[in-house]
Amino acid sequence: MNLIQLSTLLLVPMFSAQASAQVETPTVTIDSLETVPEETLQETYEKDSDDVLQIRVKGFLDTYHALRTTGNADWMASRTRARGEVRLEKGATALFVSLNAIYNGILKERTGIELREAYLSYTKGNLDLRVGRQIVIWGVADALRLTDCVSPIDYTEFLAQDYDDIRMPVNGLRAKYTLGAITAEAVCNPVTNIAVIPTDLHNPWAMRLPNTSLPYSIDLERGKPEKRLKNMEYGGRITVNLSGVDFSVSALRTWNKLPALRMGMTTDGKSLQIDGRYRRMTMLGADCSLPVGQFVIRAEVAKYIDEAQNAAMGCEVECRNALNALIGIDWYPGNDWNASLQYCHKYTSGNLERLPTYRHAGIATARLAKELLQNTVKISSFAYIDVADGGIFNRFSASYSLNDQIELTAGYDYFHADKGKFQMYAKNSEAWVKMKYSF
């Protein structure tokens, strides 16, 4: 199926939505408005509004291409995507469906139609229910995950995508109840979703072992939790929104979404076998956001109880308790400037002698952005800094909005690392362009 056919599938609902809106809108005729009380008119309007099926359609078409700038100048990414979002509303009930039609010139297996979200919601008074395929976001951290443990991440093309695009939906039930400034939220996912880590070496973003000359194979699938009711995820969050501060507390019974790695020699002793391991864990967390003049101060903390840890060579994966704490500050000095800094520290407790795990580890982020020419041009730089190992990943971008529908963006991704989490991507620095049309 080519790109034109895939895009057509997403445009069909838009035209049918317009036709339905014209056909199904009821008409109310009143012979003499002067004899009808105002209260009756209002009741009639509200009743008719509840009976009307409202259809809202939007979406976009974008294309993204990236070229390696270190070593061989080969293609790192080449993909075109059409997204369509349809929302049907009638009274308190709504159905939301989001589809991606993708053509990927590098990763052929990613070409096709992808159901991103599809959920049924019911909103009445203080109650908000949502069931189906959906994305759940917790916490106040920017592009870092502490309490945000519900929806996993798709690292098929690592961070060479917008952070919102790599969030994976979960199939589950979410219920919210708001009473004044307090919102209680409960989530339940009968089937656990695990992060996607590419292992096929024809993918430039695949997981690699940079410090070994031995052949190796990686299996992250076999150890995934079985699709059984006893393995379900469940938890809740309570949020308080006050005039001067927002804060929340949360708890989740879940799994480590990123695999803990077990490494050993094969039986013939000629190669390495790396397996992914997943264990039950509990997350207890809290976060807050506090505006102070031109600044917004954010803080988040998460305790991981029995988090699976990477194992040393020939050893089995073990679980330890870990405490994650983040502090962030956003600055809005005016004149369309924005700057932010974050630091997240992780402390792992217990005996670490057989585990290749730091007792203390840290990662920081820095963002600087400026809008120009009546907000039609935006220049930004966002960096991850691996404090423990000294690696860095920085994405610089400049975008220009031709109008409300068309946006052109160019950028450069810079990687540097001798060890740590960015080492396997040390040769993946790239220049890229992106074009987006929204409708």
Image (cartoon, grey):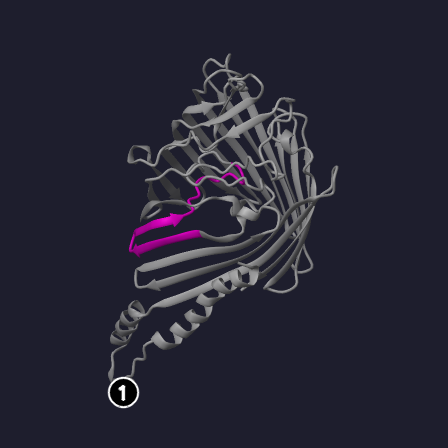
Report the span colored magenta.
116-144
In the image shown, does 350 or 192 lie closer to the viewer?
192
Hey, which quadrant is residue 205 in on the image?
A: top right
Residue at figure coordinates x 36%, y 77% from the top left: 23
Hey, which quadrant is residue 16 in on the image?
A: bottom left
Secondary element type, mark 1? loop
In the image shown, does 287 or 427 lie closer to the viewer?
427
In the image shown, does 189 or 141 lie closer to the viewer?
189
> Farthest residue toward the bottom?
31
* 170 falls in the magenta region: no
Rendered position, 432 above or below 363: below
In the image shown, does 149 or 366 lie closer to the viewer?
149
Hey, which quadrant is residue 27 in on the image?
A: bottom left
In the image, is 206 to the left or to the right of 432?
Answer: left
> Farthest residue toward the front?
268
In the image, is 131 to the left or to the right of 76?
Answer: left
Which residue bears the numbered disc 1?
32
In the image, is 267 to the left or to the right of 235?
Answer: right
